[in-house]
Every structure is written in structure tokens, then in C-alpha cells.
Amino acid sequence: MIAEIVQALSIAGVGSLVTLLIQGWLDRRQKKFDRHLEEKREAFVGLVGAMKDVHQKRNEQNLAGLAYWRMRCDLVASSYVRKAIAERLDSDGTRPELHEQLVEALRRDMGLVK
């Protein structure tokens, strides 16, 4: 009887430890995901702003800003977003469907659409 109680308490203690370890791992994983999503959001918003600046006034400073935000996106974006960015920027705005493709790719990469 006493052995069964000790065994049950031991199992409960191990279960609590395992639960704690799993919860810690899940928390770290969620924080990493949240940080990565925030980095993506910041890079994508910066890119859109830089594209607007270049569209309004094409000068060396605005082009440098666009290059900076494009590089930031290259660091955090998925391959389909990088491809959409390249296609949109290479088109010089002459193909509106590329803008829509870029917006869709950015939204999908941030998990806003499936």
C-alpha cells in the first residue's frame, strides 16, 4: 500500500517535470515565432513605404532606402516573397498585376491569408 502511494507520487512528480519542460519549450517556440513575425512585418512595412517614396520622388536617397528595405526583406521573407519583390521592382510599376501578386505574397507570408 505504501509502495503504491510512493509510486503514484513519483509518477506525478515526473509528470509535472515533463509538463514544465514541454511548456517551457512551447513558450520559447512561440516567442521565437512572434519575434520573427514582427521582424517580417517591420521589413514589409518598410519596403512598402520605401516603394511609395521612390514612386513620389525618385532620387538617390529614396533609392538607397528602397535597397535597404529590400535587403531587410531578403533576410526574413520566404522565397516566394523575395521573388515577388524582385518581379515588382524590376517591372518599374508598368505591370499592375505584379503589385497585386506582391501584396498577396506579403499577406500570405505573414499568415493573414492561406
Image (cartoon, rainbow, N blue to C red):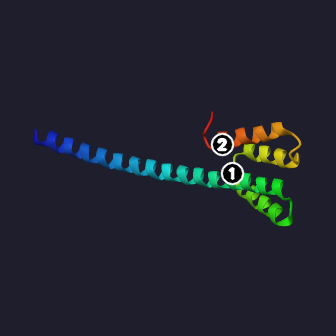
> Foreground: 46 or 33?
46
Q: Up-down: is 5 above or below 65?
A: above
Within 10 angstroms of label 2, few (less than 14), some, or many (20 or more) residues? many
Check the picture and name the quadrant holding the C terminus.
top right
Q: Residue furthest bottom?
A: 61
For label 1, the residue is 44
- Marks 1 and 2: CB-CB under 8 Å? yes
* Mark 1: amino acid: Phe
Q: Residue furthest left?
A: 1
Residue 58 image position (x, y, % from top left): 86, 59
Residue at left 82%, top 53%? 55
Q: Residue furthest top?
A: 114
Q: Which mark is residue 32?
A: none
Q: Would residue 51 be found to the left or right of residue 107 on screen? A: right
Quarter of the image for residue 106 reads: top right
Q: Which mark is residue 109?
A: 2
Choose the circle earlier in sequence order: 1 or 2. Answer: 1
Residue at left 61%, top 39%? 112
> Foreground: 43 or 23?
43
Classify mark 1: helix, strand or loop.
Answer: helix
Please identify, in this view, whether the residue under mark 1 or under mark 2 is nearer the observer: 1
Residue 76 seen in the current view: no
Q: Would residue 93 be found to the left or right of residue 49 on screen? A: right
Classify mark 2: helix, strand or loop.
Answer: helix
